Image: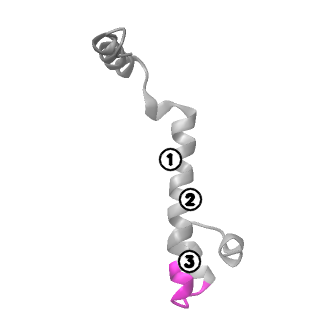
Amino acid sequence: MQLRNLEKNTLKNMALTGKIFKEKKDILYIRGEIKGKMETALEIAKELKKEGLSNEFIAKTTKLSVQEIEAL
């Protein structure tokens, strides 16, 4: 890119793409967002389980199923 001096054009095109393409509507963006939320919920569930809280309470708090919590 630097050898062909494309940096200015590339940055300009990337800015235009941002106006056309809405990444928050992209399926891969959505999948990543869901995966991140799930990983966070699992981490929280593990910590709550270490504290000795009931699986039912953890499920209610994290929106995970009791089966998912039992599998931890």
- Pointer 1 residue: 33
Of labels 1 and 3, earlier in sequence is 1
How far separated are the C-alphas under marks 3 and 2? 12 Å
Q: Which mark is residue 46?
A: 3
Specify start and end residues of the magenta stretch as a single range: 47-54
Q: Is residue 12 left or right of residue 42?
A: left
Of labels 3 and 2, earlier in sequence is 2
**Residue 70 rendering spot, x and y as whole percentages:** 70, 78
What kind of residue is marked 3? Lys
Q: Which mark is residue 10?
A: none
Q: Could you tell me which residue is drawn at 66 percent across and 76 percent down?
A: 72
Q: Which mark is residue 38?
A: 2
Q: Dot 1: few (<14), some (14–19), or many (≥20) neighbours within 10 Å?
A: few
Is residue 32 covered in magenta?
no
- From where the camera sits, is residue 61 visible? no
How far separated are the C-alphas under marks 2 and 1? 9 Å
Looking at the image, do the residues carrying marks 3 and 2 touch, with CB atoms under 8 Å apart? no
Nearer the observer, 69 or 17: 17
**Residue 49 rendering spot, x and y as whole percentages:** 57, 84
| SS for callout 3 | helix
